[in-house]
Amino acid sequence: MPGQKISLKSLLALIVVLIVLIGLFGYLNARGEKLAEGTIILKAGKQVIGEITIEDVEKLPAVNKKVVINSTSGLSKHKFTGTPLAEVFNHFDPQIVKQYERVITRGVDNYVSGVNMEEVLEKNNVLLVYADNGEPLKSKTGTSGTMRIIILNDLYGQRFTNYLVEIELE
């Protein structure tokens, strides 16, 4: 009610409850996995197929693509360097693109996106990139050495996954 005061004791109790809830959700969100930028875990369901580092990806066939991203903050121009995601899958097993229909990507910030395998198989459409304008991509903490997924047929970048740490196949 207007004019009614909250006691200091009630306010402190509310703050403690909020801190406990934030800690609990943070713990649950971590999922018990160590996800580090610069390394991508490849999974099929809950089974880990393998890991690939940024150094491994840099050894795969590279492509350079100029991209203009139209987002709520306006237009941004990029010259990305990376490799087609299909090449990454071939690095593990060429049969992956035939065995699975969908690719789910997860960033270190827990952003999740998806792409169909048909899109992955389109020439230079879904790229795993590691550099922009010749410079390594910046990690969530501002250091260099992260990767991201870009989808050239996605004009607004809604399905791009920054700070990529996990790919799950379905």
Image: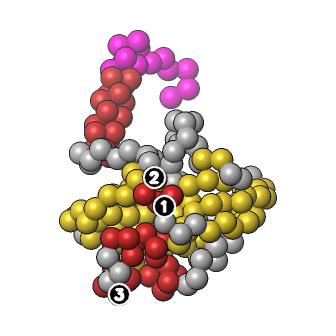
- Tag 3 or tag 1, which sits nearer the N-term? 1
- Tag 3 or tag 2, which sits nearer the N-term? 2
Which three-letter amino acid code belongs to the residue tagged 2? Glu
> Are dots 2 and 1 in contact, CB under 8 Å?
yes
Question: In the image, which disc is placed on residue 55?
Answer: 2
Sort mark 3 into few (<14), some (14-19) or many (20+) by Cα contacts within 10 Å. few
105 or 132, which lies in front?
132
Real-space Cα distance between discs 1 and 3?
A: 24 Å
* Residue at the spot 67% in from the left edge and 66% down from the top edge: 64
Residue position for label 1: 59
Real-space Cα distance between discs 2 and 1?
A: 7 Å
Question: In the image, which disc is placed on residue 98?
Answer: 3
* Residue at the spot 64% in from the left edge and 73% down from the top edge: 152
Question: In the image, which disc is placed on residue 123?
Answer: none
* Residue at the spot 35% in from the left edge and 27% down from the top edge: 19
Q: What range of the chain is rendered magenta?
A: 1-13
Q: Is residue 11 magenta?
A: yes
Residue 144, position in %: x, y?
55, 41
Q: Quadrant of the C terminus?
A: bottom left
Can residue 159 be seen here? The reply is no
Q: Secondary structure at mark 3?
A: helix
Q: Image height check: is 41 above or below 8? A: below
